Image (cartoon, rainbow, N blue to C red):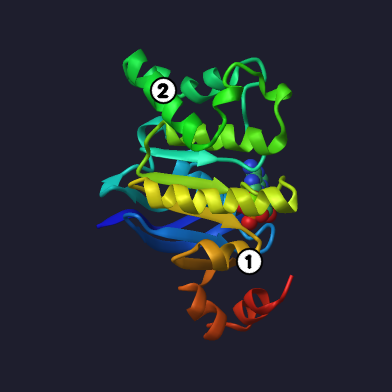
Protein backbone atom coordinates (compact mmCIF):
# COMPACT_ATOMS: atom_id res chain seq x y z
CA UNK A 1 0.00 0.00 0.00
CA UNK A 2 1.12 3.55 -0.62
CA UNK A 3 2.24 5.35 2.50
CA UNK A 4 2.16 8.73 0.78
CA UNK A 5 0.33 10.02 -2.28
CA UNK A 6 0.98 13.47 -3.68
CA UNK A 7 -1.59 14.26 -6.34
CA UNK A 8 -1.24 17.25 -8.69
CA UNK A 9 0.16 19.51 -5.99
CA UNK A 10 1.09 23.11 -6.75
CA UNK A 11 2.33 25.92 -4.52
CA UNK A 12 2.84 29.63 -5.20
CA UNK A 13 4.65 32.16 -3.03
CA UNK A 14 3.59 35.68 -4.05
CA UNK A 15 4.00 35.80 -7.81
CA UNK A 16 6.23 32.77 -8.18
CA UNK A 17 5.15 29.18 -8.54
CA UNK A 18 7.58 27.04 -6.55
CA UNK A 19 5.90 23.63 -7.00
CA UNK A 20 4.19 23.05 -10.32
CA UNK A 21 1.72 20.17 -10.56
CA UNK A 22 3.79 17.48 -8.84
CA UNK A 23 2.50 13.92 -8.38
CA UNK A 24 4.31 11.12 -6.56
CA UNK A 25 3.58 7.93 -4.64
CA UNK A 26 5.81 6.58 -1.87
CA UNK A 27 5.35 2.97 -0.75
CA UNK A 28 5.27 1.69 2.83
CA UNK A 29 8.89 1.11 3.98
CA UNK A 30 10.24 2.81 0.87
CA UNK A 31 13.28 5.13 1.06
CA UNK A 32 12.82 8.01 -1.38
CA UNK A 33 15.31 10.82 -1.95
CA UNK A 34 14.35 14.23 -3.37
CA UNK A 35 17.46 15.32 -5.26
CA UNK A 36 17.89 18.68 -6.96
CA UNK A 37 19.72 22.00 -6.94
CA UNK A 38 19.15 24.70 -4.36
CA UNK A 39 15.89 26.56 -4.87
CA UNK A 40 14.12 23.89 -6.95
CA UNK A 41 11.37 23.38 -4.35
CA UNK A 42 12.51 20.30 -2.38
CA UNK A 43 11.98 21.80 1.07
CA UNK A 44 8.66 23.36 0.10
CA UNK A 45 7.36 19.99 -1.08
CA UNK A 46 8.59 18.30 2.11
CA UNK A 47 7.07 21.03 4.29
CA UNK A 48 3.72 20.61 2.56
CA UNK A 49 3.84 16.87 3.37
CA UNK A 50 4.65 17.74 7.00
CA UNK A 51 1.91 20.36 7.19
CA UNK A 52 4.31 23.26 7.69
CA UNK A 53 3.16 24.88 4.42
CA UNK A 54 -0.34 24.93 3.00
CA UNK A 55 -1.16 23.25 -0.31
CA UNK A 56 -2.58 25.64 -2.93
CA UNK A 57 -3.79 22.98 -5.36
CA UNK A 58 -3.95 19.20 -5.28
CA UNK A 59 -4.09 16.58 -2.54
CA UNK A 60 -1.78 14.87 -0.09
CA UNK A 61 -2.72 11.47 1.36
CA UNK A 62 -0.84 9.64 4.09
CA UNK A 63 -1.74 6.04 4.90
CA UNK A 64 -4.74 6.40 2.60
CA UNK A 65 -6.17 9.39 4.46
CA UNK A 66 -6.34 12.88 3.05
CA UNK A 67 -4.19 15.12 5.27
CA UNK A 68 -3.66 18.40 3.46
CA UNK A 69 -6.04 20.24 5.80
CA UNK A 70 -4.76 18.55 8.98
CA UNK A 71 -2.27 20.18 11.39
CA UNK A 72 1.28 18.71 11.44
CA UNK A 73 0.73 16.78 14.69
CA UNK A 74 -2.13 14.77 13.23
CA UNK A 75 -0.36 13.51 10.12
CA UNK A 76 1.69 10.69 11.61
CA UNK A 77 4.94 12.13 10.25
CA UNK A 78 8.13 13.33 11.92
CA UNK A 79 10.60 15.75 10.39
CA UNK A 80 14.33 16.28 10.92
CA UNK A 81 15.72 19.65 9.86
CA UNK A 82 19.13 20.79 8.64
CA UNK A 83 19.49 23.19 11.57
CA UNK A 84 18.28 20.68 14.20
CA UNK A 85 15.58 23.07 15.55
CA UNK A 86 16.08 22.03 19.19
CA UNK A 87 14.72 24.12 22.07
CA UNK A 88 17.79 25.75 23.69
CA UNK A 89 16.24 26.05 27.15
CA UNK A 90 15.29 22.36 27.37
CA UNK A 91 17.48 19.38 28.13
CA UNK A 92 18.07 16.68 25.54
CA UNK A 93 15.52 14.50 27.34
CA UNK A 94 12.93 17.29 27.32
CA UNK A 95 13.59 18.04 23.66
CA UNK A 96 13.02 14.40 22.77
CA UNK A 97 9.84 13.99 24.79
CA UNK A 98 8.28 17.40 24.16
CA UNK A 99 6.40 16.41 21.01
CA UNK A 100 4.69 13.52 22.81
CA UNK A 101 3.15 15.55 25.60
CA UNK A 102 0.14 16.64 23.61
CA UNK A 103 -0.73 13.25 22.21
CA UNK A 104 -1.90 11.55 25.40
CA UNK A 105 0.88 9.02 25.81
CA UNK A 106 1.49 7.73 29.34
CA UNK A 107 4.64 9.14 31.01
CA UNK A 108 6.10 5.65 31.44
CA UNK A 109 5.69 5.00 27.72
CA UNK A 110 7.34 8.34 26.91
CA UNK A 111 10.27 7.38 29.16
CA UNK A 112 10.52 3.99 27.49
CA UNK A 113 10.61 5.49 24.00
CA UNK A 114 13.17 8.16 24.93
CA UNK A 115 15.40 5.56 26.58
CA UNK A 116 15.20 3.23 23.57
CA UNK A 117 15.93 5.99 21.06
CA UNK A 118 18.78 7.39 23.16
CA UNK A 119 20.31 3.92 23.35
CA UNK A 120 20.01 3.38 19.61
CA UNK A 121 21.66 6.75 18.91
CA UNK A 122 24.27 6.42 21.68
CA UNK A 123 23.23 9.67 23.36
CA UNK A 124 22.14 8.22 26.71
CA UNK A 125 24.92 10.10 28.51
CA UNK A 126 23.69 13.43 27.12
CA UNK A 127 20.06 13.33 28.28
CA UNK A 128 20.50 15.91 31.05
CA UNK A 129 22.48 18.38 28.94
CA UNK A 130 21.21 21.41 27.03
CA UNK A 131 21.78 21.74 23.27
CA UNK A 132 24.52 24.36 23.82
CA UNK A 133 26.49 21.76 25.80
CA UNK A 134 26.71 19.15 23.02
CA UNK A 135 28.32 19.06 19.56
CA UNK A 136 26.59 19.65 16.23
CA UNK A 137 26.66 15.95 15.42
CA UNK A 138 25.14 15.14 18.80
CA UNK A 139 22.45 17.77 18.26
CA UNK A 140 21.47 16.15 15.01
CA UNK A 141 21.23 12.77 16.78
CA UNK A 142 18.90 14.37 19.33
CA UNK A 143 16.79 15.73 16.48
CA UNK A 144 16.66 12.25 14.94
CA UNK A 145 15.77 10.84 18.38
CA UNK A 146 12.95 13.33 18.70
CA UNK A 147 11.57 12.03 15.42
CA UNK A 148 11.99 8.35 16.39
CA UNK A 149 10.02 8.67 19.64
CA UNK A 150 6.95 9.76 17.68
CA UNK A 151 7.00 6.32 16.03
CA UNK A 152 5.87 7.82 12.72
CA UNK A 153 5.06 5.82 9.61
CA UNK A 154 6.79 8.50 7.56
CA UNK A 155 10.08 10.24 8.38
CA UNK A 156 10.97 13.45 6.56
CA UNK A 157 14.63 14.53 6.49
CA UNK A 158 15.52 17.97 5.08
CA UNK A 159 19.26 17.99 4.29
CA UNK A 160 20.05 16.55 7.74
CA UNK A 161 23.73 16.02 6.96
CA UNK A 162 24.54 19.44 5.49
CA UNK A 163 25.84 21.01 8.69
CA UNK A 164 28.07 18.07 9.65
CA UNK A 165 31.73 17.60 8.83
CA UNK A 166 32.71 14.92 6.33
CA UNK A 167 33.29 12.06 8.80
CA UNK A 168 30.10 12.74 10.74
CA UNK A 169 28.18 13.03 7.51
CA UNK A 170 29.12 9.49 6.55
CA UNK A 171 28.43 8.14 10.03
CA UNK A 172 25.03 9.82 10.30
CA UNK A 173 24.11 8.71 6.78
CA UNK A 174 24.82 5.10 7.75
CA UNK A 175 22.79 5.52 10.93
CA UNK A 176 19.81 6.80 8.99
CA UNK A 177 20.09 3.78 6.68
CA UNK A 178 20.23 1.49 9.75
CA UNK A 179 17.28 3.26 11.31
CA UNK A 180 15.32 2.57 8.15
CA UNK A 181 16.08 -1.14 8.51
CA UNK A 182 14.81 -1.15 12.08
CA UNK A 183 11.60 0.83 11.92
CA UNK A 184 8.35 0.17 10.14
CA UNK A 185 8.30 3.44 8.25
CA UNK A 186 8.85 5.08 4.90
CA UNK A 187 11.48 7.80 4.64
CA UNK A 188 11.84 10.85 2.43
CA UNK A 189 15.30 12.39 2.45
CA UNK A 190 15.98 15.74 0.78
CA UNK A 191 19.45 16.52 -0.50
CA UNK A 192 21.40 18.28 -3.26
CA UNK A 193 24.18 15.67 -2.90
CA UNK A 194 24.29 12.92 -5.53
CA UNK A 195 26.35 10.56 -3.37
CA UNK A 196 23.83 10.70 -0.52
CA UNK A 197 21.03 10.08 -3.00
CA UNK A 198 22.77 7.18 -4.72
CA UNK A 199 23.71 5.42 -1.49
CA UNK A 200 20.44 5.85 0.43
CA UNK A 201 17.57 5.72 -2.04
CA UNK A 202 15.34 2.95 -3.24
CA UNK A 203 14.08 5.58 -5.67
CA UNK A 204 15.36 9.05 -6.46
CA UNK A 205 13.01 11.90 -7.38
CA UNK A 206 15.12 14.30 -9.41
CA UNK A 207 13.70 17.83 -9.15
CA UNK A 208 14.47 20.98 -11.08
CA UNK A 209 12.62 24.26 -11.65
CA UNK A 210 9.56 23.45 -9.52
CA UNK A 211 8.96 20.09 -11.21
CA UNK A 212 9.95 16.43 -11.16
CA UNK A 213 12.39 15.62 -13.97
CA UNK A 214 12.59 11.88 -13.35
CA UNK A 215 11.67 9.24 -10.78
CA UNK A 216 13.71 6.05 -10.79
CA UNK A 217 16.10 3.77 -8.96
CA UNK A 218 19.64 5.12 -8.50
CA UNK A 219 20.73 2.84 -11.36
CA UNK A 220 17.96 4.10 -13.65
CA UNK A 221 18.59 7.80 -13.14
CA UNK A 222 22.34 7.26 -13.43
CA UNK A 223 22.42 5.01 -16.47
CA UNK A 224 19.22 6.06 -18.21
CA UNK A 225 18.68 9.76 -17.44
CA UNK A 226 15.34 10.93 -18.84
CA UNK A 227 16.41 14.50 -19.53
CA UNK A 228 19.57 16.48 -20.23
CA UNK A 229 19.22 18.03 -16.78
CA UNK A 230 19.25 14.63 -15.05
CA UNK A 231 22.25 13.53 -17.12
CA UNK A 232 24.16 16.65 -16.09
CA UNK A 233 23.10 16.77 -12.45
CA UNK A 234 23.32 13.11 -11.47
CA UNK A 235 26.33 12.40 -13.63
CA UNK A 236 28.48 15.27 -12.39
CA UNK A 237 31.15 14.08 -9.96
CA UNK A 238 31.39 16.17 -6.80
P1 LIG B 1 15.11 23.91 -2.06
O1 LIG B 1 14.76 23.28 -0.77
O2 LIG B 1 15.06 22.98 -3.23
O3 LIG B 1 16.41 24.64 -2.01
P2 LIG B 1 12.86 25.65 -1.46
O4 LIG B 1 11.69 24.76 -1.45
O5 LIG B 1 13.43 26.06 -0.16
O6 LIG B 1 13.99 25.01 -2.40
O7 LIG B 1 12.51 26.98 -2.24
C1 LIG B 1 11.91 26.97 -3.52
C2 LIG B 1 11.66 28.41 -3.94
O8 LIG B 1 10.66 28.96 -3.11
C3 LIG B 1 12.87 29.31 -3.80
O9 LIG B 1 12.88 30.20 -4.87
C4 LIG B 1 12.62 30.02 -2.49
O10 LIG B 1 13.25 31.27 -2.48
C5 LIG B 1 11.12 30.14 -2.48
N1 LIG B 1 10.55 30.13 -1.12
C6 LIG B 1 10.66 29.13 -0.21
N2 LIG B 1 9.98 29.42 0.92
C7 LIG B 1 9.42 30.63 0.71
C8 LIG B 1 8.57 31.49 1.49
N3 LIG B 1 8.16 31.15 2.71
N4 LIG B 1 8.19 32.66 0.94
C9 LIG B 1 8.58 33.02 -0.30
N5 LIG B 1 9.37 32.25 -1.10
C10 LIG B 1 9.79 31.09 -0.60
MG1 LIG C 1 15.84 23.17 1.00
Q: Nearer the viewer, mark 1 or mark 2?
A: 1
Mark 1 Cα-neighbour bin, 10 Å: few <14, some 14–19, many ≥20: few
Which percent across, then down, holds residue 221? 53, 78
In the image: residue 187, left or right of residue 223: left
Q: What element carries label 2?
A: loop
For image coordinates 54% across by 58% down, the residue present is 19
Instruction: Report the Cα–Cα distance between label 1 and label 2.
Output: 34 Å
Which quarter of the figure is the N terminus placed in? bottom left
Q: In which quarter of the image is residue 199?
A: bottom right
Given residues 208 and 2, the one toward you in this image is 2
Secondary element type, mark 1? helix
Q: Which residue is drawn at 45% across and 45% down?
A: 155
- The residue that label 2 is drawn on is 100
The answer to whether the residue labelled 1 contacts the one labelled 2, judged by CB atoms less than 8 Å apart, is no
Foreground pick, 126 / 155: 126
Residue 228's x, y, as percent?
63, 83
Could you say which disc has been placed on residue 152 in the image? none
Image coordinates for residue 80, horizontal then vertical, percent: 55, 40
**Dot 1 beta carbon under 8 Å from ligand 2:** no
Q: Is residue 126 above or below residue 82?
A: above
- The image's mark for residue 195 is 1
Instruction: Give the camera-side residue of 4 and 60.
Output: 4
Query: Residue drawn at (46%, 24%), measured in percent from left and top?
Result: 99
- Against 127, is 30 above or below? below
Percent position of residue 21, x then y: 47, 63
Q: For this view, does 95 lie left or right of residue 153?
A: right
Residue 140 position (above or below residue 33) = above
Q: Which residue is drawn at 41% across and 22% down?
A: 100
Residue 56 at least partly seen: no
Amino acid sequence: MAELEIINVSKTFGQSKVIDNVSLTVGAKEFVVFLGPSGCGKSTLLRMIAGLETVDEGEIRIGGKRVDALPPGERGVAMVFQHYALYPHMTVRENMSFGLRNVKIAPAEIDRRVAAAAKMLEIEHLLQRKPAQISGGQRQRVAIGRAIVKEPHLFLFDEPLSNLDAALRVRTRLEIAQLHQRVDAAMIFVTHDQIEAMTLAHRIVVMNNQRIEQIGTPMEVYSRPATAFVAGFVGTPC
